[in-house]
Image (cartoon, rainbow, N blue to C red):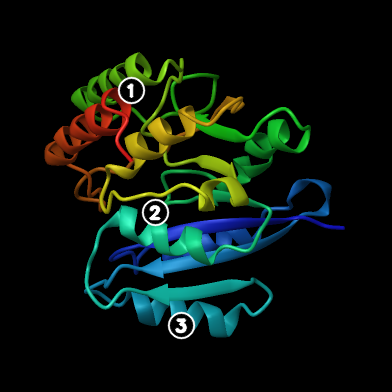
């Protein structure tokens, strides 16, 4: 029986790119004849994102899209919580609504999962020979320091804790209680999966087509401090 990949996409003010990322997803031929379901969670966008999604749905009925929206802006993590809860696929991957990550690499991430070797797969921007846009020096240093701090408390040797591309067995991720509503999702979920007995975590090198702030990038230095707080809270102190 064919398996399904749930693609959870948190969306906030992405009217300019949402149709482009959905086009990319629609062109992906998943391995082993897998099906896909796209779960869009509109986190109370203030632009025409909702209208753009509605238009896309009416013109692309062949792509299975489930649409949900928040009545108030809650943050990326909260949108992910909604999407994860609504997923019905066997596997679940997180996809940003912009064009920084390439859906063509889903099969690369799925490979260790489908071979029976992995329970979780992270896509790393810092390993492998994939294209990587050269942008913010201090963002790179910050990402690596946060990853290092996370590894100290989880005992893992991940190279890119902050990556968007995280692939899970759906039943497993739905069984984890997640609390962080903004960008603290990354260190929280990493800390909590690290505590699962006999968890098998793999990394796969991915490409990265980063955006500048003028192009719509949203994460900032305040989110870095929140990530550090979450590393201590869920990693060092092992709070639930």
For disc 2, the marked residue is 98
Q: Looking at the figure, which quarter contains the N terminus?
A: bottom right
Q: Is residue 31 left or right of residue 101?
A: right
Q: Secondary structure at mark 2?
A: loop
In percent of width and height, residue 100 lies at 41, 44
Q: Residues within 10 Å of mark 3 (few under 14, many from 20)?
A: few
Q: Looking at the figure, which quarter contains the C terminus?
A: top left
Query: In which quadrant of the rendered view does residue 228 lie?
Result: top left
| Cα distance in 3D space between marks 1 and 3 | 39 Å
The image shows residue 134, relative to residue 90, as above or below, that is above
For disc 1, the marked residue is 150
For disc 3, the marked residue is 54
Q: Which mark, by number, is residue 36? A: none
In percent of width and height, residue 197 lies at 57, 27
Looking at the image, is mark 3 or mark 2 earlier in the sequence?
3
Looking at the image, is mark 2 or mark 1 earlier in the sequence?
2
- Residue drawn at (69%, 75%) of the image: 62
């Amino acid at each position: 029986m064919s398996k399904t990949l749930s693609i959870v996409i948190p969306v906030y003010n992405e009217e300019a790119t949402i149709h482009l990322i959905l086009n990319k997803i629609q062109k992906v031929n998943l391995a082993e004849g897998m099906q896909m379901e796209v779960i869009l969670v509109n986190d109370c966008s203030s632009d025409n994102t909702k209208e753009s999604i509605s238009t896309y749905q009416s013109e692309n009925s062949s792509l299975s899209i489930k649409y949900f929206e928040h009545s108030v802006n809650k943050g990326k993590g909260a949108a992910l919580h909604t999407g994860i809860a609504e997923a019905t696929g066997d596997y679940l991957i997180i996809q940003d609504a912009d064009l920084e990550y390439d859906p063509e690499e889903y099969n690369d991430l799925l490979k260790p999962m489908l071979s029976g070797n992995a329970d979780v797969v992270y896509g790393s921007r810092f390993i492998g020979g994939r294209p990587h846009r050269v942008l913010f020096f201090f963002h790179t240093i910050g990402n690596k320091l946060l990853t290092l701090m996370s590894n100290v408390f989880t005992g893992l040797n991940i190279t890119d804790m902050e990556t968007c591309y995280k692939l899970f067995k759906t039943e497993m991720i739905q069984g984890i209680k997640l609390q962080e509503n903004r960008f603290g999702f990354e260190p929280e979920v990493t800390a909590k999966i690290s505590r699962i007995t006999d968890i098998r975590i793999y990394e796969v090198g991915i490409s990265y087509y980063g955006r500048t702030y003028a192009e719509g990038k949203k994460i900032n230095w305040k989110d870095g401090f929140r990530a550090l707080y979450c590393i201590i809270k869920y990693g060092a102190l092992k709070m639930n």
